[in-house]
Image (cartoon, grey):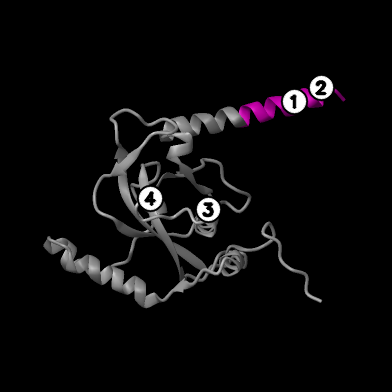
Amino acid sequence: MTQPVTVQEASVEQQRYAAGLSVRDSDDASKAIAERILTSQTEEDIFGGPQSLGNIEESELLFEAILLYNVTFNESSFKSKDPNAPTVYCILEIAKAKPKKAGNVGPNSEWVKDGERFLIGCGARNVMAAAIRGMDVGLYDPDNPIPVQVLVTRKQTGRGFYPYSLRSLRKFGYVTRAEWYAQEKKEADDAEAKLRSQETLF
């Protein structure tokens, strides 16, 4: 008898299916691109050649405040050499954000839309896992989007990747790139110091 897969053991794809999430048809992404062209105002945007939704990991949105309205998933056409790599990517519906009250960027701060809503892709595993769980527990409300940041660590994983994550601005407040990296360094230094202190006991 096949043993059930636990949440901890499940891949992103398995968790997505377990949560009952449907995959976007590739035509949906094409329609989103077409809609973006139809609302464009400049020659560059209208006749820009082959277009895609873009990728948040390679955009200027890292560490920026954004409002997260919704998330869907699309099958990836990218074939990775890593057999454990996700075969899907998520499409985030977002808008840039700014604090409702200037300078108020700490925990429990309020954030408002700063521009139009748009779609952007993301293939980072931790971001997708958070996006899945957010949908699973019903956090997405078009009238009350979630203010978040997409953060990236400076420390590579054993496979050479830089992990990305979603951070809630309502719960934890805004953090600059420099502050985040300083926090990472402090945590690493504290962990090393703790390890050294334990070694001296033996």
Q: Which of marks 2 and 4 is in front?
A: 4
Magenta-drawn stretch contains 176: no
**Mark 2 and mark 4: span between their CA atoms?**
50 Å
Magenta range: 188-202
Which one is in front in this view, the residue at disc 2 or the one at disc 3? 3
Identify the residue at horizontal 42%, vertical 52% (top origin): 57
Rendered position, 36 above or below 31: above
Q: What is the crowding at mark 3: few (fewer than 14 residues within 10 Å), some, or many (at least 20)?
A: some
Q: Which amino acid does label 1 sit on?
A: Arg
Q: Name the residue under label 3.
A: 130
Residue 17 visible at all: yes
Task: Identify the residue position indicated by label 1 in the image.
Answer: 196
Q: Earlier in the sequence, mark 4 or mark 1?
A: 4
Which residue has dot 2 on it?
200
Quadrant location, the N terminus: bottom right
Q: What element carries label 3?
A: helix
Q: Where is residue 192 in the image (x, y as percent from the top left)?
A: 68, 29
The numbered mark, 3 or 1, whose residue comes first in the sequence reads 3
What number is the disc on residue 145?
A: 4
The 10 Å Cα crowd at callout 4, few under 14, some 14 to 19, many 20 or more, is: many
Amino acid under disc 2: Thr
Quarter of the rendering containing residue 198:
top right
Compare marks 4 and 3 and give the one earlier in the sequence: 3
- Residue shown at the point (12%, 63%) measured from the top left: 43
Quick check: marks 2 and 1 in contact, CB under 8 Å? Answer: yes
Badge 1: how crowded within 10 Å, few (<14), some, or many (20+)?
few
